[in-house]
Amino acid sequence: MMNCRACIAQLVECARAGLPPGSQLQGHLRACPPCRERWEGELALSAQFRKMRGAAFARRQPDAQRERIMRAFEQTRPIAFRPSLRWVLGMAAVLLLAVAISQIWRVGQHLTGPAKNPIPEEFTNSATGGAADSPTGNTTGNMGASGPGEFVSNNDFVEVPYAPPLATGEFVRIVRTELRTTALARMGIYVDAAGADEIPADVLLGEDGFPRGVRVLDALDF
Amino acid sequence: MQPSDEELYRRMRKGDQLAFAELYTRREPGLHRYSLHMSGSWSVAEEVTHEAFLRLMGPQAGFDPRRGPLEAYLYGVARNLIRVTRRDKSGGPARDLPGTHDVLGDLIQDEMTAALYAALRQLPEPYRDAVVLCDLEERSYEDAARLMGCAVGTIRSRLHRARALLAARLRPLTASSAMVAK
């Protein structure tokens, strides 16, 4: 014999599915008035739910609602885009920062970094230059108010013959290196190097990179 | 193969209107009916459904696919909005429900429907959710459990209990309806 608890569990599912109760359940319902009452209540409830479902499907104006929400989507679309726009702006800022840093780095390299030996290879024995006033071997400066010829002679430089003259105010660079005596001779500067192939010297370069003067150094100065 | 709700949502967030339209077509009818049954009011249902989709497209949409399906999120938003509406209006009987054709039947039917909606509104929210999803939306127990974020057995027991409460509330009306029918 089915008990009330099992009966109710089954009759709820039967009422929901719209199925008639099985023979065992029918037997219990005939013998148990409370369960029969519950069964009738469940049937009425299911019937009412069916009507409510039908009504919910029937009375709608979905097109108007749809138009309304689509308009809202159009209007809010820029807002939806805002995070990605923010991301793009962020990326642009990072890119600008990177360019600025690279520019600063390049300028720094130009001013303080190891420079290529500006003396043509044919004049020097090796590519490495010695130190002049700075550890890198290069010194950059302005001639100031003094004339170009004056600057060369006042600093013990021997002018390189036939080289274009320095302009007033032109930036010059002094590079300390070892020069071959033959190269010096080709420049029109004859040095008694006591048999040495190369001698230490400061070379004065104009802004165009051409040598304008040479200052021969003692071996100890180098 | 149809794109998932979550895929449509992802595309929608990038501004794809077609994706939004498809998502709306797919989920709006069910969400509207759910809101209607939960609130007992057509106007509330329309506003709640509209607002739920507005929130979905807004910049502060809190949907996270790792926390559950999009449908559950939409139902959750609707549930919260209805809760707020109920708090504001302190829940009178629904007045804008559909009628039928027969005058006497209409009166009884409206009374029955209004009474059932009133009884539904008085149910604890988890019970009401179970009735609306399983009986009015005809969702399976598994679907309802997924949307509610609970176990299938929990949904079943809530539904049985809720139906017992509702049947008890409707009994006097059912009896008078039977008398009219005779």
Image (tube, coloured by chain):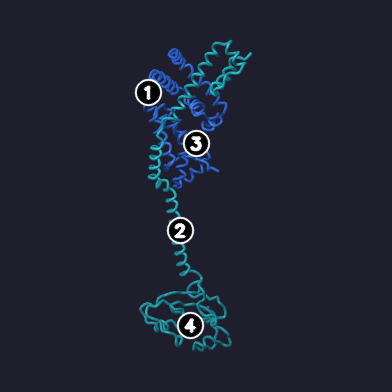
Chain colours: A cyan, B blue
User: What is the chain identity of the residue bearing mark 2?
Assistant: A
**Residue A67, image quadrant:** top left
Position of residue A135 measured from the top left corner of the image (x, y, whole percent): 50, 71
Picture coordinates of residue A63, whole percent (x, y): 40, 38
Q: Residue at x 58, y 87 (%)?
A: A195
The type of residue carrying mark 3 is Glu
Residue A95 has which mark? 2
- Tell which subunit mark 4 falls on: A
Helix, strand or loop at label 3? It is helix
- Nearer the camera: disc 3 or disc 2: 3
Image disc number at residue B71: 3
Instruction: Pinpoint the chain carrying mark 3.
Output: B
Do the dots labelled 4 and 2 sit on one chain?
yes
Camera-nearest label, 2 or 1: 1
Pointer 3 with pointer 2, Cβ within 8 A: no
Type of amino acid under label 4: Arg
B87 displayed left or right of A122: left
**Which residue corresponds to mark 4?**
A215
Secondary structure at numbered mark 1? loop
Q: Which residue is labeled 1 in the image? A: B92
Mark 3 and mark 2: span between their CA atoms? 40 Å
